[in-house]
Structure formats: C-alpha cells, structure tokens
Amino acid sequence: MSTLETFDSELRAGAPVGDASEAFDVRKEIYADDALSALSELYGSRDDFAELVARIYRAVHLGFDQRSENLKHFDLRRSQQPDWFQQTDRIGYMCYVDRFAGTLGGVEEKIPYLKELGITYLHLLPLLKPRDGDRDGGFAVSDFHNVNPDFGTMADLSTLAEELRNNDISLCIDLICNHTSDEHKWAMAAKSGNQTYKNYYNFYPNRTLPDRYEKDLTEVFAQSAPGNFTHVEELDEWVWTTFYPYQWDLNYSNPAVFVEMLETLLFLANQGVEIFRLDSVPFLWKELGTDSQNRPEAHSIIRALRALVSMAAPSVCLKAEAIVPSNQLVRYLGRGEHAGKECHLAYNSTLMTMLWSALAEGTAKRISKVLASVPPIPENASWVSYIRCHDDIRWGVLHDETESYSQEEWEAHTQFLSDFYASRTENSFASGAKFQTTDGHEVHGTSGTMASLCGLEKALDAGNDQDIKLSVQRILLMYSIILGYGGIPLVNMGDELGMLNNRDYQNNADFDGDGRWLHRVSMNWQQADKRHQNGMVEQKVFEGLSELIQLRAGLTALKGGQAHVLATANDAVLVLHHRNAQGELYVAGNFSDKVQKFKLPNVNASLEDCRTGKAQAKSVELKPYETIWLQPKH
C-alpha cells in the first residue's frame, strides 16, 4: 500500500493526522503528476530533463525542511479547511508599508485598526529591496531575499507575519516573477559578460530580432517607456524590457530561472507569507510572431509552481495579476483537465472596470450584460474583487469582453469613460486624471482615489451637502457590489475613510511624473481618528463599510463561486444572485441618481432585508445609489 493510501485509510478510520513529514510524503504523491506534466510541457525536450526534475525536487525538499514547526503545523490545520479563502469573513486590505505605517513594525502596531474594520487578509505592496533611483513603486526588485531597508529586515517581516497569523490575518506580498531590476545580482553579472546570467534574460546582439518581435507586441507604458527592448551599453546588446528600461524580463525558457523563482517563493513562504500576488503573469513566456502574452507556457509555469509549492507549503495561495479580458482571465485559475490547478485566486479586473463604467453611465445595462458573459470559475478557486488598487483603471481590458458590442462601440465607450473620470464631460462628478496619454483624446487608463472618482473631492470643494451625501452613497454602492459578488473583496487603503487625491506628487522628483501617485496616498491618521466622530464623512464611510463587512461575514450563501446576474425591467439596477447548499441571497444596487423601482424576477419565497430583518416585497424601491441585500425569510 502506498503512503497516500495508508494516509487516506487512517483519515477514514478517524486516526489522527500523521506528523508533518508523513503529510509531506503524501503531498508529493498527490501533486507529482501535476508537477511532472507541467514541467514536461516546459522543458521535457531537454536532454537533461531528468536531472532538472531531480534538482527541482531537491529545492522542494529543502523548502520543506527549512519550514518552521509552527508553519508545518499551520499547513496541517489549513489542510483540514482547503476552502479557507472562500469563507465569507475573508476581507482584504491593500497598502504600501511606508504609506500606511512607515515600517513593518509600524504595520504590526496597526493590527487593531485592521481588525476593527474586519480585515483578515493584508496585502503589503512591494516591500523587497528595490533598485536605487527609479523603481516603479517597488516593482523593480534588486534582492528577493531582503526587505527594503527603509521598512525593516526579513526578520521583521517574519515577526509581522506571525503576529498577523495570530490575529487571523493572512499576509500577502508581491512576487515579481516577470522581471528583476537591472541592479539585481543576476543582472549585474550579466552586464559583466557572464554568459550563465545573460541566459537568465533575453539578450540580442542587434535590433534584428527585437524589431521582428516589436511588430506584434503592445507597449505597456507607451508614453514614459516606449518599446519593449533596451540597449545595454556595457555589452552593446539589447535586452527585453516589457515595462521600464531598468526592469529586465526573465527568460523562463531557461529552466534555471524557473528553479530560482521556485526557491525564492519557498524562501518567502517560510517567512510566513501565505499569499503571493504573481505580478504580470501574462508576460512570462516570449514567442516570436505573437504578442507574447497569455502563452500556454505561462500557464504551465503557474501549474508547476502550484503543484510544487503545494508539496512543501500547502497553506500558501497563488494570486494571478492578469489585467486581461475575462475569457482569458479565468484561464489563470485553470481550465479543462487543469481546472483549479493554476492560481487559487485572480483579480477580477472585469468587475472593477465595469463598475466604473456603470457609475459613469448611470445605468447597469452594460455591466449586467458583460458580467453575465463571464465564464464560470473552478469550484476550488475564487475571485479577488476590488474597486481601486495601486495601478490605474485600465480601460483597454473592456474591448474584448463580449461580442454584443463592436470594437468601434467599445472604443467610443472607453473614450467617454476616460473623459468622464478626467472631468472632461458635462456633468461629471469625478476628479481623476488620464494616465499614459500624450493628448486629451488618447485612452489608456485613469488615475484617482475612489473617493475623488466618486465625486467627494468636488463636493467637498463646493461645500455642497447633497453632493457629499451622494458621493458617500456611490462609495458604499461600489463596495456593496464587490462585497456581494463573491470571492475575496479587497479594500484599498484610504477608501474606508474617503481619502482624496494627492496632487503633491507632482512636486516630488522621486515619483518621476508617474500619474499613479495621484491615488497612492499616505495614510492620514488624524483623518482616521474622525471615523468615530458623528457626522463626519470619514465616520459615514467607515461605519457604512464596516456594517457591510459584518453583514457579509454572516451570509453563508456567499461562500465560494461567483454571482449570477438577474435581468430586470429596470436597466438602472444591477441584481446579483447567489444560491448554494447553505442559502440564497440577492444583492441589488441602483446606479442612477434617481429613485428606481424594480421587481425581482422568478422569486417565489418571501424575502427579508438582511440588514434589518424586516419583510420585503418582491417589488423594491431604491434611492439614488442605494443597495439592498435580500434573503428568503426564515
């Protein structure tokens, strides 16, 4: 009888789970086929494939051996609840270390604040040691094994992770797996002519191949960093740089790069990190004659990482950062025979952009149609639903969302959205800015905090109480929808207080004119103190959001999966529907500035308002930007 069969029989017989080493052996058997299949797709044609697999397994064994006993026991506990990240009390919060609390120790001191809001998942934006000078907000990493010294040390990170875990808060950090900075030790060795490390990147002796590649490639930062290749003076050669000239793309066709990234992931997991945001995963594999995005090999890389990490550190989750149309996005959670075998989580960029679309249009007609076309996700995966993040709102993701709209219609619509949120249309309530455009007519993305984009900045400047009230209602409407959609909702730092744009970044040379710093604000703790002062905007937003978070935690109908969109005769209202073995739930939101009435279709049961417990008729009236959560009456 195999180790796996023995382990399974013991569990069925009610025997206690064996020690961590026995569990590790079981996991190796469980995930071996998935790992070998994915690795074969990547490197199976190599003569040294068997040796490579042995090297990879040595890395997995070392990662497990170096894992603390506390983390090994934590792995065993998590294995008893593999759907832990699908629970309704999972609420995320995202921030920069320095902008939230200065240092990692400062973040630890703010744990009570996070718990007050109901946070159980903390994403700290890039905190590993960056390059000097320009650093793309920390995404230009020079050392994966050390923390930015301004924030603390790796020991501080481990201490923070343990304290968060003790408070039932999962730590998430970024694994920048597509590139390193040009100051990373691998890049420095490559600059010196070391061929081993040149092979870690994509070098070309002249522009012949880069020019052939460029015919099919897009430009991520067309304004500030045009092109996808950078000349390296030390070598008089060209290197692939998708994002900025100082960020060199890694060459995953070289298996040594895959091994290095696996070892990095396991090292950071052993510091107590539970969730890794895999940065820019669509770009991991390069192929001539394509746009070098979303290639099958990129999915194989993720599947291999998932299987191997599941052996050594099964409590770890992988989260895909892929800002692509939903039909491509769901693939990062796995599909077909590989469903649920890539990332555990993925950012729901479609929901995010369509929410802003609906708010600008004042109607839910388009968002209802698009969300209804989103493919289902695997049962053992979840969305991360968000409204704002450190990046811009990228409108281009909408163009391929549904065949119901032509390319020309989408282009006209995204132009409208770009102008609306830059306050360039009549009656716009927003105070945002266009991102990565050279003139007023180009469309790339939009920068701005949630509150400013929802109208609060303009309303406060004008001192208009009615507009302030409507702005707060817009904020809570947007959060009500992501909290009611399913998956893990993510709060962007400052949203809970209605924090406004920071225009001072334009006077700071360190930000190099990057318009995204408009919404990358610093936490104002004096403003946070106002969350307990009756009548203050901060109090209205904080308490309104806290109430929604508490409401969500008790509604088991939201567990797992994603919402289904219900059509109504009123296009101003979006209606989401959940049903599982534990219950049923309706979440409805009015995206217009007028009172709206609608009737829930095909509802036979008596309903009650989840907030008040009062009976609710199937005909519903909602005030401007109001939401309602309904369930069958008990």
Image (cartoon, grey):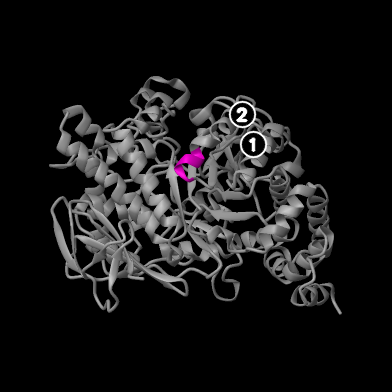
User: Are there few (<14), some (14-19), or many (20+) residues within 10 Å of tag 1?
Assistant: many
Q: Amino acid at mark 2?
A: Gly
In-front residue for pair 445/499: 499
Residue plotted at (33% across, 59% down): 399
Identify the secondary structure beneath mark 2.
helix
Q: Is residue 258 magenta?
A: no
Q: Which callout, 2 or 1, points at the residue further toward the start of the chain?
A: 2
In the rendered image, residue 451, in percent from the top left (x then y), is placed at: 30, 38
Q: Mark on residue 392?
A: none
Q: Which residue is mark 2?
A: 105
Contact (Cβ within 8 Å) of mark 2 with mark 1: yes
Looking at the picture, does residue 145 appear above or below residue 60? above
The image shows residue 288 at horizontal and vertical percentages of: 55, 58
Horizontally, residue 314 falls left or right of residue 215, namely right
Query: Could you tell me if residue 442 is visible in this image?
Result: yes
Where does the image place residue 574, in percent across and percent down from the top left? 26, 62
Which residue position holds label 1? 160
**Picture quarter with the C terminus:** bottom left
Image quarter hosting the N terminus? bottom right
Q: Note whether residue 175 is visible.
A: no
Q: Which residues are magenta?
A: 114-118
Q: Is 115 colored magenta in this rendering?
A: yes
Q: Quadrant of residue 317?
A: bottom right
Which kind of residue does numbered mark 1 sit on? Answer: Leu
Residue 22, given in percent of the width and then of the height, sits at 83, 64
Q: Quadrant of residue 424?
A: top left
Q: State the separation of the CA atoms marked 2 and 1.
A: 7 Å
Mark 2: few/some/many CA within 10 Å (<14, 14-19, 20+): some
